[in-house]
Image: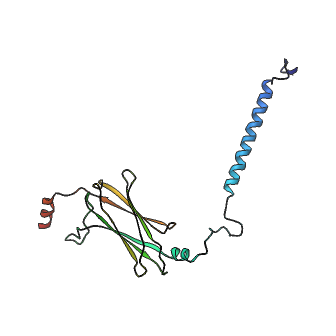
Amino acid sequence: MLRCSGALVPDNLLCPRQVRQKETAMHLLMKGTLVLLAGALCSCTAPAGSGGKEPQASTAPSAAASSAKIREILVVTKGNGATTQNRSEPVGPDSPISVTVSVTHSGSEVPSISLRLIDLKNGQVLGEKVQPVAANSDSAHFEFKPTQPWSEGRHLLEARLGKTGKVVQREFDVVPSRPAGAAEVDAKS
């Protein structure tokens, strides 16, 4: 029997003061473990001897890929051409979309360009294509044709050089189709 706060307590039971001491010890142990884990995670850095720089592969294609960059993403409504003011026609729900991705590169080997078309209203990927850039060219051409009419609103094109290149984005709007009579009235005025 133990004496706890003036009362006798059997050996197999703990008095409230001993319970608090054990709880405090457990809390300190848990906090110490969390601090150690957080310290271990925060101290994860580049491998020793790298000087804090990202590891780089020593293969030739990686060097060529790093020198290539996406310069421009041009969106044109396929088949509509330009208006009388030399502006591209707006993208309508039934319009095929022609995209030209221009790159700047100095090497002879340029990685393929992947292009994704995303509807920003619902986040759905509407199409994804991959095209190589010809050695004597500085661009790749893509075409997206609607299987169902494009939803009206904001859309996004994401272009990437190779599998690990930087993503370049271009937003555009799909606008409601104009009736055929409205196009003729605009052309006359």
- Residue 60 sits above or below residue 157 on the image: below
Q: Which residue is drawn at 75% across and 33% down?
A: 23
Q: Residue 180 in the image: x percent, y percent?
A: 15, 60
Residue 10, given in percent of the width and then of the height, sits at 84, 20
Q: In the picture provided, is 161 more to the left or to the right than 141?
A: right
12 lies left or right of 145: right
Q: In this view, does 23 lie to the left or right of 63?
A: right
Q: Quadrant of residue 146?
A: bottom left
* Quarter of the figure that contains the C terminus: bottom left
**Residue 171 to residue 139: above or below:** above
Where in the figure is residue 133, as x and y percent of width and height? Answer: 42, 75
Front one among 45 and 93: 93
- Residue 162 shown left or right of residue 5 in the figure: left
For residue 132, which quarter of the picture?
A: bottom left
Is 153 located above or below residue 103 in the figure? above
The residue located at (51%, 74%) in the rendering is 65
On the image, the x and y values in percent for residue 31 come to: 72, 42
Please identify the residue farthest to the top as the structure is shown: 7
In this view, the residue in front, 16 or 158, is: 158
Quarter of the figure with residue 26: top right
| The N terminus lies in quadrant | top right
